[in-house]
Structure formats: structure tokens, C-alpha cells
Image (spheres, rainbow, N blue to C red):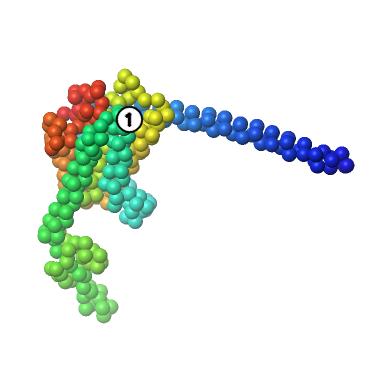
Amino acid sequence: MDVKTENSSNGFTPEINLEKLHKMAAEVILMGKFILRLLDAALVFVTNVLARFFGSKLVRRHFHLMLSALVLFGPVLSFWVSKYSIFANSNHYLYRKFLKSTWGWTCIFTASFTLLLSLSARHPPSLLLRHLSRIGVVGLLWWGCRGLLTLLEDAAGNCYEPVIPAQDIQGTSSSLQPLLLLHEDQTKASCLRDNMVWRGYEVSQDVLIICLCCLLLVEEMSVFGLYLAQAKPLPRSHDAPLRFIFLLCVVLLALWMFLLLCLLAHFPKFPSQHLGGALGYLGWRGLYQGWYRLTPSWGCPGLPGEGLITTTDKDTQPQ
């Protein structure tokens, strides 16, 4: 007993504990490095496969056809989906947090991807601003369409207030429909906010912006495969942030496709959703298949990757 006390008082035990702690820390560091290398290898493999997929001619030339078919035939799924599904609730978390800010999420991720791509390619800031302006033009298009559609909906619709008939107040049954009191000075937003009934023509702005964002993401991500095929790729340590943002863009695209499918299946609205999808397609067609294909100048941002990637092949652009 005295020997153990004497050894502990001489400081041998703390030295042994420190050595064990150093060994444990070294093992943890080695394990952490191994996990990071494994995750980095998985990131490289997944992004290489996805870049090859989105850069293929099949996807770039026919993705808009697949999206059009989804908008056209998606409401048919309403005959099979359950009305008790969690996605049948319009107050679901995904609808509240993502659907109302679709353009914000898309703008953040695509702008980050374009920024990192330009910095990795080491081009002047003027070229970066020109490519970022391409995303800004889409934002202006969405802002203008939303304002114009809101004005048209307010002009083409009317607000009604349900009125309970006198027979129902007295407790007698009646087969008549509730009377409606017209409010001509109400807009659609104020009418719905006051829990009244709005009747009129409308275009689904949710379907419009989701379709536009899906087409935008596919166009912007399609050049990543060409970037990876360059003769002098960057080291993995510098390439990882760009790959990670690219992967987040793919996840965001999958989320928008899922939300679009939920809207069409659980909340079918004919023909407002089809009109929204058609306007989104026309917006993409006019920009990426029209204006952006012109000769790059101060008035034309150019196509994705143009001037950033030296191996740009225009044959891979969708027709």
C-alpha cells in the first residue's frame, strides 16, 4: 500500500496516462484521416458518375421532354395516391420551407456552383460576372412573370363571401347552395387572407418556378463533366468544395422533381398547372435555346461554361 502511494506521489502514473492519451489521440487522428479519405473517394466517384450523366446528350437534349410528360400526365396519379398521406397536407414542412422559396434556394446553389467553377478555372472577374448575370436574368424573368400573372389573376377573377341562408340559421334543411356576396374591391391575396372565396382564371406559379428551376439546374450542371475532362484538373483538396456544391445541386434538383410530383398528384389543378409548366418551358426555351446562344457580348451572358472551359463542345448542347 505504501509502495503504490509512493509511486503515485513520484509522478509515474500521470506520465503513463499521458502516453496513453497521446496514443489514443494518434489513433483517433489516423481513423479520422481514413474516414475523410473514404468520404473524399466516395464524393469523387459519385460526382464523376453524376457529371457524366448530366453531361450526356440524352439528358441535355431530352430532359425537357421528360419534364413536360411529368407535368402533362402527373395529375393522373391523383387516382391512386391516398388522401391521408402526409404529402396531402398543404401545410407540410417541405411545402412551407422549400416551395415558397424555390427560386431563392436555386439561385444560391447555382450561383455558388458558377462562382466556384469560375474560380477553379482561374478566369478574370469580368467573365465570372457575365456568367452570374445569366442567373440574374432568369431571376428577373421570374419576378416579371410573377407580377404579371398576379395582375392578370386579380383582373380576371372575383371575390365572394359565403352567406348562410336564413333556413340554415333557423335549423331547417335546405338543398340550396350558400349565397355569395360579391366584393369587387378585393385582390386574390386579400380575398384568401380574409377566408373568402376567389373564383377566376389562374396560372400555377408553383409549377412554373419549379419547372424553370429544374431546367436551369440541368443546364448549369451539364458543364461539370467538361470541366472534369480538362487536361489539367485541380488537386482534390481544391476540387472538393466544387464537387460538394455540384452534389448539393443534384440533391436540390431531385427535391424539386419530388415536390412537383407531389403537387401534381395530391393537388391537381387543370389547366392552371399545365399553363404554369408551359410558361416555365417557354422561359427556358427563350433564354437557353435562344438569347444565350447568340454571340457573347455585353448584352448576352452566353451559355454555361462558355469561356470558362476550353473543351466546350457545342454539339453537346440540346437542340
* Disc 1 crowd, CA 10 A, few/some/many (<14, 14-19, 20+): some
Which quadrant of the view contains residue 54?
A: top left
Let me know if residue 79 appears in the view: no
Give left or right: position of 224 versus 37. Answer: left
Query: Which residue lies under the disc numbered 1?
Result: 120
Residue nearer the viewer, 124 or 281: 124
In which quadrant of the rendered image does the N terminus lie? top right
Q: How many marks?
A: 1
Taking the spot 65% from the left edge, 32% from the top edge, the residue there is 23
Residue 2 drawn above or below residue 183: above
Percent coordinates x, y for residue 64 in the rendering: 21, 35
Residue 229 drawn above or below residue 164: above
Percent coordinates x, y for residue 216 in the rendering: 24, 38
Residue most toward the bottom?
170
Q: Amino acid at mark 1?
A: Ser
Percent coordinates x, y for residue 119 in the rendering: 31, 32
Give left or right: position of 187 versus 266. Answer: left
Which quadrant of the view contains residue 154?
A: bottom left
Taking the spot 16% from the left edge, 29% from the top edge, the residue there is 319
Taking the spot 28% from the left edge, 40% from the top edge, the residue there is 111
Residue nearer the viewer, 249 or 93: 249
Residue most toward the top?
231
